[in-house]
């Protein structure tokens, strides 16, 4: 009895898929299916050359795709290692990052840094960890470039605030009177670089910042 080549082909295909439902058809399975088809072809109706060439072309395409996938995977792995190596080279360098928190310790607060792209009137607001506004200051008209303000850790009534973490907002006043937040900056030496999944962080002044928050990198200045 001459077997139905189509049913054999499909049965073999479904059998392969049933054993490995989560595995995609690879080139080894493709070869096995092709060999099975050739073995069980109808002698009275041999496999047409065009069909054979077509299937071999598919196999070649599958091979090329597999090789391409491996090349892309290898490239990504190599690129990831390169990025990590580049990030690690920042250890010891001085960086400036976007930040808006400030730690008061022993009644003192570090300078608050920010940058103006053009001369503008600037307003500073500071809140405690609970979101209560504890300080407001109109800094007046300032020139473009990096600026800083040293807060005395007191509220607007002149009362010294307890040590802890505070959050500040720096606003630029536009000509129409509206306010535009320009954020704050913090500067320090990179103490370590940390990797967490696909994310890269730097450790500076005891605080972790995402690498995307860095806006300037410079060599550490020797004192």
Image: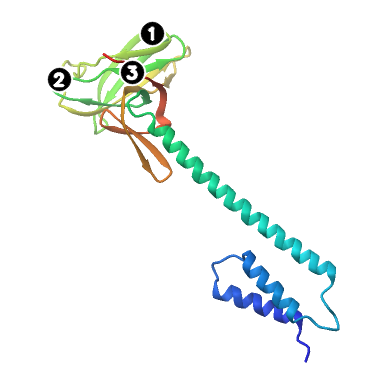
Find disc 2 in the rendering and name its residue.
160
Find disc 3 in the rendering and name its residue.
113
The picture places residue 106, in percent across and down from the top left corner, at 13, 23
Residue at mark 3 to residue at mark 1: CA–CA distance? 13 Å
Residue at mark 2 to residue at mark 3: CA–CA distance? 21 Å
- Indicate which disc residue 199 carries: none
Q: In which quarter of the image is the N terminus?
A: bottom right
Give me the residue at 32% from left, 16% from top.
221
Q: How is the image coloured?
A: rainbow
Find disc 1 in the rendering and name its residue.
142
- In the displayed structure, would residue 77 be above or below residue 122? below
Find residue 143 and report its image quarter.
Answer: top left
The picture places residue 139, in percent across and down from the top left corner, at 33, 11
Q: Is residue 162 left or right of residue 179?
A: left
- Which circle's residue, 3 or 1, is located before the other in the chain? 3
- Which circle's residue, 1 or 2, is located before the other in the chain? 1
Give me the residue at 16% from left, 15% from top.
158
Find residue 7 and report its image quarter.
Answer: bottom right
Tags 2 and 3 touching, CB below 8 Å = no
Give me the residue at 47% from left, 41% from top.
80
- Which circle's residue, 2 or 3, is located before the other in the chain? 3
| SS at circle 3 | strand
Q: In this view, does 131 lie to the left or right of 197?
A: left
The picture places residue 194, in percent across and down from the top left corner, at 34, 39
Q: In which quarter of the image is the C terminus?
A: top left
Residue at mark 1 to residue at mark 2: CA–CA distance? 27 Å
């Amino acid at each position: 009895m001459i077997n139905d080549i189509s049913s054999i082909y499909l049965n073999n295909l479904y059998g392969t898929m049933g054993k490995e439902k989560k595995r995609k058809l690879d080139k080894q399975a493709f070869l096995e299916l092709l060999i099975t088809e050739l073995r069980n072809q109808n002698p009275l109706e041999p496999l047409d050359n065009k069909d054979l060439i077509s299937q071999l072309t598919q196999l070649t395409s599958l091979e090329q795709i597999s090789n391409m996938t491996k090349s892309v995977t290898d490239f990504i792995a190599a690129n990831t290692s390169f990025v990590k190596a580049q990030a690690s080279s920042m250890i010891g360098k001085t960086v400036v990052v976007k930040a808006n928190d400030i730690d008061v310790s022993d009644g003192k607060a570090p300078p608050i840094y920010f940058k103006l792209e053009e001369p503008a009137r600037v307003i500073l607001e500071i809140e405690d960890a609970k979101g209560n506004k504890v300080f407001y200051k109109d800094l007046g008209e300032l020139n473009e470039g990096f600026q800083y303000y040293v807060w005395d850790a007191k509220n607007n009534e002149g009362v010294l605030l307890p040590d802890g973490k505070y959050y500040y907002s720096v606003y630029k006043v536009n000509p129409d009177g509206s306010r535009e937040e320009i954020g704050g900056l913090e500067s320090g030496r990179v103490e370590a670089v940390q990797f967490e999944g696909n994310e890269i962080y730097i450790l500076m002044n005891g605080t972790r910042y995402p690498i995307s928050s860095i806006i300037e990198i410079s060599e550490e200045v020797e004192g």
